[in-house]
Image: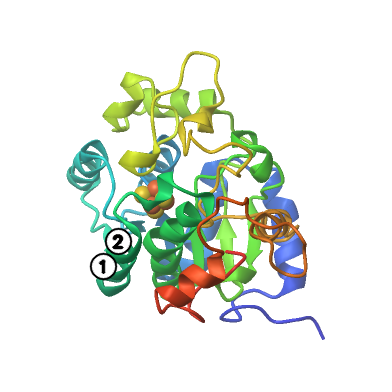
Amino acid sequence: MDEQVGNQVMDQIEARQVGLALEAEGPEQVLAWALEKFGDRLAICSSFQVESCALIDMAWRIDRSVRVFTIDTGRLPDETHDLVERMRERYGLAIEIFMPEHQVVQKMVSELGTNLFYRDTNLRLLCCQVRKVLPLKRALVNYDAWVTGLRRDQSATRSEVRKLEIDDLHGGIVKLNPLADWTEREVWDYVRRHDVPYNALYDRGYRSIGCAPCTRAVPEGAGARSGRWWWETGALKECGMHCAVESGGFQRQLSELLGVNGHNVQPPDDAVHSLEQLTELLGINGRISKGS
Ligand code: SF4
């Protein structure tokens, strides 16, 4: 018997078969299939970067009741909040907003400082866990399937993203990446053609937009994600919300970076703490996933 996954909405055989078929389809076809299959148990996870704005527009044209949620980390730029409001007005969507647990944030910044992420990669990963990854886990409990704006050419860690994946990090629900094979240019062509609202920071040299203190504009010709956590050298340009679920590639690299799971790679000498020590300090042990 084939292994059942998540909320048993799709078993492994079906996921493989459907995934193969969807690889040949465009984003609108992938979204149409997903909306039909999952209905209101599907949501677009939007960080309000240009990719997810395009996806919201596409999905809204198919089904005006499409669900959208976002993670408000508490450190987003004003321009992103402005865009959320413009998207609400344009599409009439009730965008669900998930936030980090305030007690955990309060403890983290009290113990480690508001801008802890500049001091150490482990502290940066911890902040991303607290402000992004844990709220995402809470959000996804509500759904059987989620849609992201991941594209294969965004970075090496995303090069194997598939249009349909089983998301083992989130209970085996279905993860859809309809733009997996699109280029940045194709996304912008769509956005301009349909006059989709986008973040004002793109007009100021930004090419990937996350939290305000961790994102900056990039010079012409630089990698799109080089403006994210720009002070770090050698660390992955990832926060932990996404990974190559089926290959386990990102999980393995993150584990190595943190020196966990039997690997001997230790944090640098000037590292303040390991992720385990930090999570213990914050009292969130057992509620944090090393690999996510
Ligand atoms: Fe914290 Fe920066 Fe990660 Fe945002 S991007 S959660 S501010 S470390």
Q: Position of residue 24 (x, y in %)?
A: 70, 43
Residue 160, which numbered label?
none
The N terminus is located in which quarter?
bottom right
How many other residues sit within 10 Å of disc 1, few (<14), some (14-19) or many (≥20)? some
Q: Amino acid at mark 2?
A: Val
Question: Front-most of 49 and 111?
Answer: 111
Q: Is label 1 in a helix, a strand or a loop?
A: helix
Q: Position of residue 47 (x, y in %)?
A: 38, 47
Colour mapping: rainbow
Q: Is 129 left, or right, of 212 in this rendering? A: right
Residue in the picture at 32% in, 20% down: 203
CB of mark 1 within 8 Å of CB of mark 2? yes
Q: Residue 41 occupies which quadrant of the picture?
A: bottom left
* Element class at badge 2: helix
Is 57 left, or right, of 26 in this rendering?
Answer: left
Task: Return the x and y of residue 244 as percentages of the image width and height.
Answer: 67, 54
Residue 248 falls in which quadrant of the image?
Answer: bottom right
- The residue labelled by disc 2 is 109
Which one is nearer the viewer's eye here, 65 or 131? 131
Q: Quadrant of the C terminus?
A: bottom right
Q: Residue furthest top?
A: 220
The residue beneath circle 1 is 106
Where's residue 103, x and y in %? 27, 74
Q: Dot 2: few (<14), some (14–19), or many (≥20) neighbours within 10 Å?
A: some
Question: Left or right of 176: which side holds 40?
Answer: left
The reply to whether residue 143 is in sight is no
Residue located at (57% from left, 50% from top)? 177
Q: Decide: is 188 above or below 150.
A: above
The residue shown at (46%, 30%) is 227
- In the image, taking residue 82 as reference, residue 96 lies left or right, namely right
The amino acid type, in three-letter code, at marker 1 is Gln
What is the C-alpha distance between the residues marked 1 and 2?
Answer: 5 Å
